[in-house]
């Protein structure tokens, strides 16, 4: 952020007023009625900016443990004074893998390719998969408990 602020020529105190954070996702709040009880139902989906992409073009995870197309969805329901909320997360399988749909775009399920061995032989890819998956799981534990 600092190089952008300097390039724009903004004084340190003013940059917060001019740069707005953006959420990549979806939000909706609706009112409904169930068994004579008024409900407010909110749905918020936040998509990660890390490893986002089109399905089949972005798969697996990276060396920092970020999975492709990670989305956190929160559902909030209010009935009178009672409020309930829960969060679900989804993303690509946390391993190094890919799918190539460039050969035949009509395929519903293009074949996938797992990275299970290092180029030139060896089993270093298993250790790489295990290390990146551990980073991913630790991040989930840190954020969601």
Image (tube, helix red, strand yellow):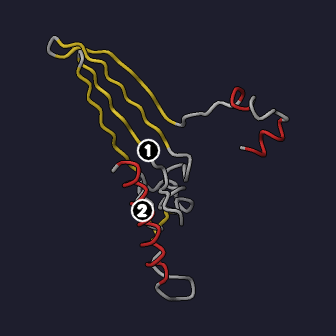
Q: Is residue 17 left or right of residue 46?
A: right
Disc 1 residue crowd, few under 14, some 14–19, many 20+, Cα 10 Å: many
Quarter of the image with the N terminus in it: top right
Where residue 103 is drawn, which disc sits there? none
Q: Which one is nearer the viewer's eye here, 102 or 50? A: 50
Q: Residue at x 70, y 26 (%)?
A: 17
Disc 2 residue crowd, few under 14, some 14–19, many 20+, Cα 10 Å: many
Q: Which one is nearer the viewer's eye here, 144 or 55? A: 144
**Residue 33 falls in image quadrant:** top left
Among the two numbered marks 1 and 2 on one chain, the one whose residue lies closer to the N terminus: 1
Question: Tag 2, which secondary structure?
Answer: loop
Residue annotated with mark 1: 71
Q: Which one is nearer the viewer's eye here, 2 or 37? A: 2
Q: Residue at x 33, y 40 (%)?
A: 87
Where residue 94 is drawn, which disc sits there? 2
Question: Tag 1, which secondary structure?
Answer: strand
Q: Residue at x 47, y 31 (%)?
A: 26
Q: Is residue 53 at least partly visible in the picture?
A: no
């Amino acid at each position: 952020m600092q190089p952008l602020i300097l390039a724009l020529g903004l004084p340190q105190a003013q940059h917060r007023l001019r740069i707005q954070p953006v959420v990549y996702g979806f939000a909706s709040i609706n009112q409904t009625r169930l068994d004579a009880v008024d409900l407010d139902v909110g749905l918020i989906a936040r998509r990660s900016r890390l490893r986002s992409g089109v399905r089949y073009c972005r798969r697996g995870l990276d060396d920092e443990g970020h999975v492709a197309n990670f989305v956190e969805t929160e559902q909030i329901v209010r009935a009178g004074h009672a409020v309930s909320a829960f969060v679900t997360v989804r993303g690509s399988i946390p391993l190094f893998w890919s799918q190539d749909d460039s050969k035949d775009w009509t395929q519903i399920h293009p074949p996938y390719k797992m990275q299970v061995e290092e180029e030139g032989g060896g089993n270093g890819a298993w250790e790489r998969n295990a290390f990146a998956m551990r980073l991913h799981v630790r991040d989930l534990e840190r954020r969601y408990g």
